[in-house]
Image (tube, grey):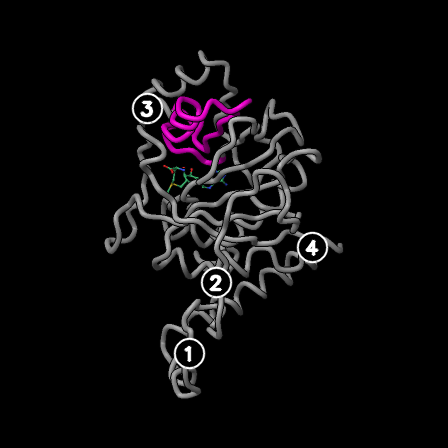
Amino acid sequence: MYINPEWRLLTIGDGDLSFSTSLWNNYKPQHLTATVFDDKQSLTAKYGDEYYQQLVHSGCQVLSGFDVTDQQSWGELKRNQYDVVIFQFPLIPAFGSEQEFKLQCNNFSINTLNRRLLRINLLNCFQYFLAENGAKLAFITSKDVKPYRQWNVEDALTLGTDIHFIGKVDFNINQFPGYKIRNVDRDKHVKSTQGITYIYSTELDDNIKDRPKAIKSQGKSCSICRTGVFYTDLDEKIHLASKKHLQMLQFEQQWLSYLQQEDHQDNK
Ligand SMILES: C[S@@+](CC[C@H](N)C(=O)[O-])C[C@H]1O[C@@H](n2cnc3c(N)ncnc32)[C@H](O)[C@@H]1O
C-alpha cells in the first residue's frame, strides 16, 4: 500500500487502533482521523486503550462508536477533508442470535450485507469524506478467499455510481509494524495477514500525482468469479456449469435485488 506523507487520512473500522497507530508512527501523514466501530468502553474492555492514548497524544483525532453507514454516529468528523479513506478487512459484526439476524437481514444473505457495508462505505467516502481538491482515493483491503472473494468487490460494489474500481495491490503487513489484524478468523486457508488492497476513485486520470500503481485483471475470464483466462470454449462451459459459478450467480442476483430496492427507496 502506497502512503504519501502529504495525505490527510481517515481510517474506518479499525479494530484495536493498531493499524492507525502504525500508519501514524511509520508514515507521519499530514493528518489522521482514526475511527472504530466499537464504543470507547467496549474498545477499552476488548483491547485496552494504549493505542487510543498514543494517537490522541500525537494530535490525531480518534472517533469511537463510528458506524460508516450511519451519519448520526460520525460525531465531530469534519466533512470532505481527506485525501484517502482506508478500510482494512471490513466485515459486518456477528449477529448475537438467529432472531437478531432475521430482524436485521431483511431477507438478504450475509454476502449481500457485507457488500452493502462496502458500497455504503464507498458512497460515503466520495460524498462526505474525501476532499474535492485531494487525491480522492478509497482503499479497501480484503482477502482473496471465500467468503470475502464472493463479495465481488472489483465489479459489484460501485454499480450505477460514478465511482470506479481502478486497481489492486497486494497488502504487505510488513509495511505496518505493530499492526495486529483483528477477528479475521473465518477462514483457515490463508494467513490472517494476507490480503489485497482494492483502490477506488471517481477520477480516472492516470496522471494524477502520486496515484498508486495498480494492476488490473486482463484476459477472457469469468468476471464475477474472477476465474480464467479460459483458453478453450470447453473450459469456459465447464466453469459456467460449476457449483462455484452457480453460487456466485446467486449472490449476484441477490445483490441486484438489493440494488433495486435501494434504488426504489432513493426514488420515494
Ligand atoms: C475483521 S474486523 C477488522 C478490524 C480492523 N480493521 C483490522 O484490520 O484489524 C472488521 C471490522 O469491520 C468493522 N465494521 C463492521 N461494520 C462496520 C460499520 N458499519 N462501520 C464501521 N466499521 C464497521 C468492525 O467493527 C471490525 O472492526
Q: Label 3 to label 2, Cα distance in Å?
A: 42 Å
Whichever of labels 4 and 3 marks the residue nearer the N terminus, that label is 3
Q: Which residue is mark 1?
A: 230
> Residue 39 in magenta?
yes
Whichever of labels 4 and 2 marks the residue nearer the N terminus, that label is 2
* Badge 1: residue crowd in 10 Å (few <14, some 14–19, many ≥20): some
Label 4 or label 2, whichever lies nearer to me, is: 2
- Of helix, strand and loop, which one carries label 1? loop
Residues marked 1 and 3 touching at CB (< 8 Å): no
In the depicted view, which residue is nearer to us: 81 or 76?
A: 81
Q: Residue furthest right?
A: 268
Q: Label 2 to label 1, Cα distance in Å?
A: 13 Å
Location of the N terminus (image quadrant):
top left
Whichever of labels 1 and 4 marks the residue nearer the N terminus, that label is 1
Image side of residue 243 versus residue 151, left or right = left
Q: Amino acid at mark 1?
A: Phe
Q: Which residue is mark 4?
A: 265
Q: Which residue is mark 3?
A: 45
Q: Which residues are magenta?
A: 12-41
